[in-house]
Image (cartoon, coloured by chain):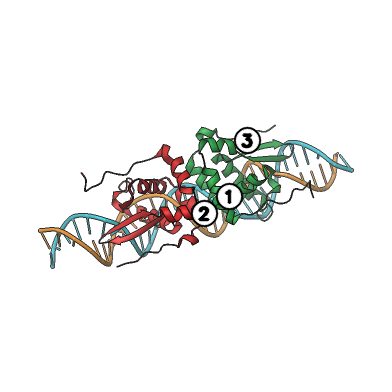
Chain colours: A green, B red, C cyan, D orange
Amino acid sequence: MKTVFHPSIKEVRLENILYALSDPIRLSVVQQLEERGEMTCGEFNCAEQKGKSTMTHHFKVLRDAGLIHTQVEGREHLTTLRRKELDSRFPGLLDSILSAAESVKIHAKPRRSSG
Amino acid sequence: MKTVFHPSIKEVRLENILYALSDPIRLSVVQQLEERGEMTCGEFNCAEQKGKSTMTHHFKVLRDAGLIHTQVEGREHLTTLRRKELDSRFPGLLDSILSAAESVKIHAKPRRSSG
DNA sequence: ATGATAGTTCTATTGTTTTAGAACAAACAG
DNA sequence: CTGTTTGTTCTAAAACAATAGAACTATCAT
């Protein structure tokens, strides 16, 4: 079972959060996670238009910034938003960014299993 | 009297705001404006360590993102935060970013005229 | 006019980011 | 074992961003 680097919540830097979310793809990833809760890499809208290695890169930026958590489960990588931790570290920040982003929201793909 | 480009508030994009504030110097500029209200370029802390042209560049990024307003007054350039406009466009956003940034705050230089 | 001040514009260097192709690895299905 | 799925790592190209030196413009003071 492979482990992936995640910064502890107190190591998380505001600048990195803002930078990570200044990219439309990464912002969209976070929006989709907020909507859905837990997703594999392939479930994201935008995961097909963009090459796989491009998405791997973006997930790493989000992970290093402290925004998401990745857990390896079989051959899938389950991604979640570090919502509670982030809310306690930077109260109101994610709320206001996500609500500001509502207007440009791209929704997650329908669940594979429920179709 | 020279005029400088400023985007209208509805043209302001969240991504550009986040990007602009993901740089420590630019975040600090915004923090100092929040604290002080109106400043000339030279009054900013960090304006001396960094070359003048570097600061000109950062002010332009902030201006293009819609965060600041620059008004030419004699040979000085008076900079203000577009606080109210931004608050109405993205409620709570600047508040939460600035309060998240409190911990890493760098204060503005003392006023020249009051020393 | 001369000089100082405030800041811009031009140009260049250096470093970082985004993107993606190709080869790879690990898990699962038959 | 063979093939498919899921995603990574490696490598490289192209675009972009941060920095600053030098020359410049405009204002203000003497």
Q: Secondary structure at mark 2?
A: helix
Left or right, D27 with reference to C2: right
Residue that mark 2 sits on: B14
Q: Residues within 10 Å of mark 2 (few under 14, many from 20)?
A: many
Q: Position of residue A77 (x, y in %)?
A: 69, 40
Q: Nearer the viewer, residue D7 or C24?
A: D7
Callout 1 touching callout 2 (CB < 8 Å)? yes
Q: Position of residue A115 (x, y in %)?
A: 79, 50
Residue that mark 3 sits on: A4
Question: Which amino acid lies under the numbered mark 3 shown in the image of this protein?
Answer: Val
Q: CA distance from mark 1 to mark 3?
A: 21 Å
Q: The residue marked by circle 3 belongs to what chain?
A: A
Q: Are marks 1 and 3 on the same chain?
A: yes
Callout 2 touching callout 3 (CB < 8 Å)? no
Q: Residue at x 45, y 54 (%)?
A: B86
Q: CA distance from mark 2 to mark 3?
A: 30 Å
Q: Hey, which quadrant is residue D28 in on the image?
A: bottom left
Q: CA distance from mark 1 to mark 2?
A: 10 Å
Question: Which amino acid lies under the numbered mark 1 shown in the image of this protein?
Answer: Leu
Residue that mark 1 sits on: A27
Question: Which amino acid lies under the numbered mark 2 shown in the image of this protein?
Answer: Leu
Give the quarter of the figure containing the N terminus of chain B.
Answer: bottom left
Question: D25 above or below B52?
Answer: below
* Mark in front: 2 vs 3: 2
Say which label, 1 or 3, has the lower sequence index: 3
Left or right, C24 with reference to B47: right
* Mark in front: 1 vs 2: 2
Give the quarter of the figure containing the C terminus of chain B.
Answer: top left
Q: The residue marked by circle 2 belongs to what chain?
A: B
Q: The residue marked by circle 1 belongs to what chain?
A: A
